[in-house]
Image (cartoon, rainbow, N blue to C red):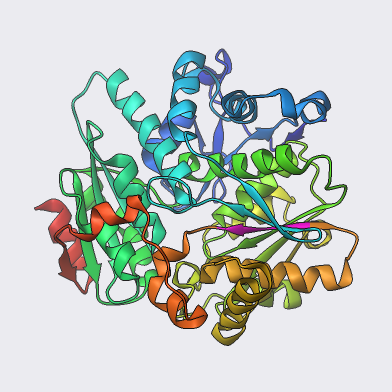
Amino acid sequence: MKSTFQKSIPKELNNCNYMNYFSLNTPDHISSFKDAVIRGIAPDKGLYFPESITPLDPSFYETIENYSTVDLAYEAIQQFIGDEIPEEELRAILSEVLDFEFPVVELEKNVATLELFHGPTMAFKDVGARFMARCLGYFSKQSNTKENVTVLVATSGDTGGAVANGFLGVEGVDVVILYPKGKVSPIQEKQLTTLGQNIRALEVEGSFDDCQAFVKKAFLDESITDHIKLTSANSINVARWLPQMLYYIIAYRQVKDKAEKLVFSVPSGNFGNICAGIVAYKLGLPVDHFIASTNVNKVIPDYMDTQTYTPRASKPTISNAMDVGDPSNFIRIQKLFSNDYDQLAALFSSESFDDDQTKAAMLKLFIENEYVADPHGAVGYLGLESYMEHHPDTYGIFLETAHPVKFLEVVEETLQTKVAIPQQIQKVMGGQKKSVEIATYEELKSYLLD
């Protein structure tokens, strides 16, 4: 069965094995994968969305234990790229991107965590950032022009470090990272401000939502885009968003024989990660339910209760990467269910938790399971625990999206224990912070043009 979102396709794309993407604002606006990656966001402000999703053959999941990680990833993602990156090149990219482990660690009966922090910056965003960087690097090498692409990205924490690391030294790409002053952890700040080379950091007087608003405005500002080729490395970019589907398929390979009813609880801020998980579901992955676990920034839990989407200013929490008051990717989730609330609610639920509950969950995991969770993973655990109270016949996996060392102060204070500093973190701790402080959009504009 083919889940299709058919749109009019330009004649020049018809004769090629392309995956076409359309804007969720203007469906007649069609783009190739390459152009969607380079543009980041459509000219009408819309997010790009694949025109079709074809489920994988059931035999893929029946024999998934026989696939290597790279083979598994290639089978899952190839349809979204088509011929725009040749098979040999795409396999090489996937081999570089997926060169670390994604273990499912069982903590208690029918409850496990999927650890996504074993990459170079110890956060789940390493996969998407490195995949996008290598795609842009490939397209840059194929280009006849020497015009650089400027990656403009807002971060609430881990995106900045992952993007900085993934794009460091990539030829033809400059990176400008906006982050909210005083609202990322010290280690997160080190990861995005100390690398130098083609990576530059702007410290914004405001919230993550302010940073994201500046970025979106810049993409639509012709006085900038007439002079600079901009793209985004936030999860609005299809090359950052889609590779996250691979986590769920890799996890399924590990629990296939014990998870008859599989549930994922995903700590959610901008909703790109859980959205990618639902794409994996649309590819035929056997998942019974998805839980979007949030902190007190609960726009989506409220939507699921009222069916009214009301964005609002974000509130600061100890799980700062989820401090988002207007999650960009939720519109993609709605589209995956044909904008039908009942279809969505059958597979998807969302619940919010405050900082006190988060700390209590961290302490519980530590005392009862000798497991050190970061605040985001603890929120994921809370969402799973709540769901399984009413669905005890399920096998639940919550995503641990960042190593606890990334939130060292709150983890050590809550658990009254010391967390060892991994090598990946040690190597940036001595780096010298270099950033530029800005407070207004006009300052961002001047910086980009100068």
Residues rendered magenta in the picture? 396-400
Locate residue 131, reporting x and y percent.
44, 36
Q: Nearer the viewer, residue 85 or 368?
A: 368
Question: For the stretch drawn in magenta, what is the main secondary structure?
Answer: strand
Examine the structure image and report whether residue 397 is included in the region drawn in magenta: yes
Total count of labels: 0
Q: Identify the residue shown where x is 54% and y is 46%.
A: 26
- The outermost residue toward the bottom is 356
Residue 177 in view here: no
Locate residue 70, reporting x and y percent.
56, 26
Is the residue 346 above or below the residue 77 in the image?
below
Q: Identify the residue shown where x is 57% and y is 76%.
A: 295
Q: Nearer the viewer, residue 207 or 128?
A: 128
Quarter of the rendering occupied by the N terminus: top right
Q: Identify the residue shown where x is 61% and y is 46%.
A: 103
Q: Is residue 170 left or right of residue 248?
A: left
Examine the structure image and report whether residue 232 is included in the region drawn in magenta: no
Q: Identify the residue shown where x is 84% and y is 46%.
A: 258
Locate residue 414, reporting x and y percent.
50, 82
Is the residue 234 above or below the residue 321 in the image?
above
Q: Is residue 329 left or right of residue 254?
A: left
Picture quadrant where residue 2 is located = top right
Picture quadrant where residue 348 is located = bottom right
Residue 181 in view here: yes
Is the residue 149 above or below the residue 156 in the image?
above
